[in-house]
Image (spheres, rainbow, N blue to C red):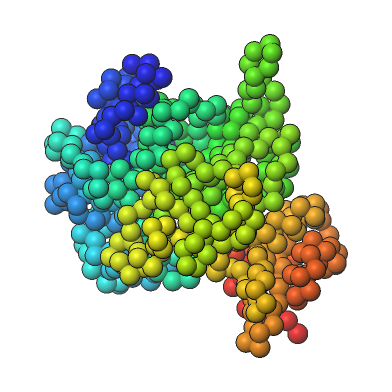
Amino acid sequence: MRTKGLRGALAADTALGAGNVLARVLAHGADPTGPGLTFDTPVDGHPAERPLTLGQLDERVAARAAWLHRRGVRPRDPIAVWATDAADMVLSFLALTRLGAIPALMNGKLRPEIAAEYLRRLRAAGVLADAAHTGALAGHDLGAPLLGQPAEAGTGDPADAPPHYRHHDEDPIVITHTSGTTGVPKAVLHSHASLFAATRHLLSMPQAQGTSRILNALPAPHTATVLMVNQALGNRAEMLLLSEQGGERVLDAIQRWRPDGVFGFSVTWAELARFDLSGYDLDSVRLWFNTGDCSHEPHVRRLVAVGYRDTVTREGVVRVPGSVFIDGLGSSEMGHSMFHITHTADTDRYGRCVGRPYRFTRVAVLDLDGNELPPGEVGWLGIDSPSLFRGYWNDSVTTYRSRLRGWYLTGDLVYADAEGRYYHLDRAVDSVKLADGRRFFTALSEERILAACPDVTDCTVVIVKQDDGTVVTDVLLELAAGADPGTDRTGAVRAALGPDVGATLRRVVPVASADIPVTVTGKVRKVALRERYLTETPS
């Protein structure tokens, strides 16, 4: 079946959901010799970066399903997966959902004691962990047996795999988690229908440029990678999944693999800002797609200046210099970005604008009583979407505390303009509210500093209200290559912050590039740098 017809058939398939995309794509007549997935590590003797066909992918998943079934894994069993390689995470997800089990995908960078406590709270039926993480769990009470390493499951016999589990819309399909930087992360549960709601909408739309050959630079255990795997399979697209998302790794993969689209988090775009992109061959890229935290203007501008895109003119479709950057705001709980805005070299609507909501969702700016606020007023972001998570696994207290009058509260502070565009100011926990009602925002402050200081490639702003009620602001600056770390930038930073926040500025600290953590979200970066540089009060 041709891809266009297949996409429409998938969008209309009521039996299709996040747990059976591979099976349903084949059932609808997709060519087994067409694209499956490509991994950056070997898979069962198949070389790294050599594509698995759709049929080979199905066979490798069936082998793992047989191995897991032989070890007693059954429908609705929560099975934790803790590994580094993208192949281990994705193939385990596909195999476990084929059985009707519930994969709980874990960030490989969790501290062992945090991971062990998270596993106990999951009440998992079993744990798959690669060699390094099996060693890290030694001596910890997990409350669940270690089933083996994810790669071992590839030794199963595909012919022994049981029939595909028949999913109901509300069957639990995957557990992912929040960052876990300040304690045990929250376990985010999605269902067969919820995690496919956004994908179904996208399959009903014309396929966007930059989605035929994708470099997935999203963290493998994250909800976003599950989404991208299903989107790529449904679109019959080629996709290479990276196990590590550092800037140099991403740039090397672009040059070698020649994707037309690169998907990642804002922390990866900040990593790319450290490099002179003119020295790399990025001409294949048409699209950069961001989710998670929204991105800063200087990082976006560097990216849209490279690559090419198709544009419609009177002479027809023309390839022109400069790529497209689609920004948004999303989280594990949202099940997809809730907003989208398109940037090219010719656009200039920044200032933390995340654009308009997708058509499958409803959003609102709320006060603490759940009343909707008018345009221009800052409030809490509320979401009502079929893509929303179904709750926090084994934590109904936190689940219901995140709901208000039918809305899911994301923890973000936003406002809408009169034209229906939304602007993200900060995570509420990172902002500071003053006695007079004013609020200081860290993310907005970072945006202003980066826009005003061209020799700064990234920054972290920490605003704290002290015990005596006074507010102090500390700013960490990552400098561009060749910038003088001895230059006093206090005046420039204070001016960029504006009179209110600028009056609270306590110190400006250059940050060594070697100390920048290569992590999965901006929130992780902020916590790590704060602990590294701001634990002592300046003399």
The answer to whether one can see residue 248 in this image is no
Q: Nearer the viewer, residue 211 or 17?
A: 17
How many circles with numbers are drawn on the protein? 0
Q: Nearer the viewer, residue 22 or 39?
A: 22
Vertical placement of 13 versus 98: above or below?
above
Residue at the location (66% across, 88% down)? 468
Vertical placement of 22 versus 489: above or below?
above
Q: Quadrant of residue 319?
A: top right
Please give left or right for residue 307 compared with residue 23 in the image. right
Please give left or right for residue 36 compared with residue 461 in the image. left
Image quarter in which the N terminus is found: top left
Where does residue 457 sit, x and y in percent of width and height? 72, 53
Where does residue 532 sit, x and y in percent of width and height? 62, 71
The answer to whether one can see residue 66 in this image is yes
Where does residue 336 sit, x and y in percent of width and height? 45, 45
Residue at the location (25% across, 43% down)? 169
Residue at the location (47% across, 56% down)? 382
Vertical placement of 413 versus 205: above or below?
below
Question: Outermost residue toward the top?
Answer: 315
Please give left or right for residue 71 compared with residue 222 in the image. left
Vertical placement of 342 versus 126: above or below?
above
Q: Nearer the viewer, residue 259 or 264?
A: 264
Image quarter in which the C terminus is found: bottom right
Where does residue 473 sit, x and y in percent of width and height? 71, 73
Q: Nearer the viewer, residue 429 or 94?
A: 429
Q: Quadrant of residue 20?
A: top left
Q: Quadrant of residue 184?
A: bottom left
Residue at the location (70% across, 77% down)? 472
